[in-house]
Image: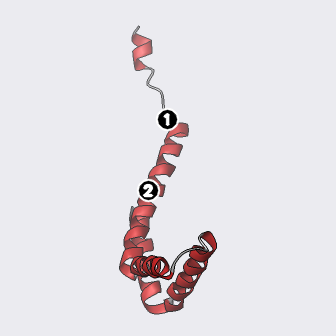
Amino acid sequence: IFAGIIAAIFVYFFITYLGEEYIETALEKAEEGMLEARPDMSDDELDMALKWTQNMMKPGWITIITVFAAAFFSLIFALIASIFIKKEDKSLEANV
């Protein structure tokens, strides 16, 4: 979780101050992807999808998503690692 918070702070400052063109590039790629996925999409549908995409590409949302993604992947990693690190309790077997 701490690494996620540090990464989120870095992402926030990067997007806010250094990577302004990153959001523009991401929005252009998102529009291209939408048109490739559904070439029959109407202009109203495309405008609405792009509006939602722009709202989600703000630094605050990206920061929140970064924290939750880091926590999620840390949980997955911990669960996988626990499979291999798990110790069996043999104290009950010795008493029986």
Which quadrant does the C terminus fall into?
Answer: top left
Between 9 and 54, the one nearer to me in the picture: 54
On residue 72, the disc is 2
Residue 25, horizontal then vertical, whole percent: 57, 86
Between 15 and 33, the one nearer to me in the picture: 33
Residue 43, horizontal then vertical, whole percent: 50, 82
Between tags 1 and 2, which lies in front?
2
| Crowd around label 2: few <14 · some 14–19 · many ≥20 (10 Å) | some
Residue at (49, 35) in percent of width and height: 86
Label 1 with label 2: CB-CB less than 8 Å: no
Q: Name the residue under label 1.
A: 86
Between 28 and 66, the one nearer to me in the picture: 28
Residue at (44, 66) in percent of width and height: 3
Amino acid at circle 1 = Lys
Picture mark count: 2
Distance from Cα at disc 1 to Cα at disc 2: 21 Å
Residue at (54, 86) in percent of width and height: 22
On residue 94, the disc is none
Q: Could you say which quadrant of the image residue 63 lies in?
A: bottom left
Residue at (44, 13) in percent of width and height: 94
Coloration mode: secondary structure
Amino acid at circle 2 = Phe
